[in-house]
Image (cartoon, grey):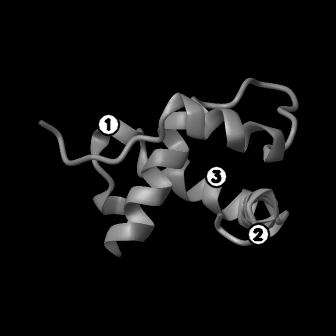
Amino acid sequence: MSNLYWLTEEQMRRLRPYFPRSRGRPRVDDRRVLSGIIFINRNGLRWCDAPAAYGPPKTLYNRWKRWSDIGVFARIMTGLAAEAPDNQ
């Protein structure tokens, strides 16, 4: 059994509306990259210590940096919080 973190298809379904449109080349697998970003942040690791299953560390970092700069992660948190504001 692996101790790697993977977003479920249901979680990805809820997150997709917040993703920016892909322009030009198709993006690398969103599920793999976002799962890797969460794994790195949750465990306090350096990008270079990302398990290979999540893809190249540079890809993880670039997606995190680019989406952070344009506010994607903030929109995700705000949107998910608005779905159930009282945690009911």
Q: Nearer the viewer, residue 71 or 14?
A: 14
Quarter that holds the N terminus: top left
* Residue 33 locus on image (x, y percent): 52, 43
* Residue 39 locus on image (x, y percent): 38, 58
Residue 53: assigned label: 1
43 left or right of 56 in image: left
Disc 2 and disc 3 in contact, CB within 8 angstroms: no
Q: How many numbered marks appear? A: 3
Residue 63: assigned label: 3
Q: Earlier in the sequence, mark 2 or mark 3?
A: 3
Quarter that holds the C terminus: bottom right
Q: Nearer the viewer, residue 2 or 87?
A: 87
Secondary structure found at label 1? helix
* Residue 25 locus on image (x, y percent): 77, 25
Q: Circle 2 sits on which residue?
A: 85
Q: CA distance from mark 3 to mark 1?
A: 16 Å
Q: Dividing the picture into quarters, in which one does residue 83 lie?
A: bottom right
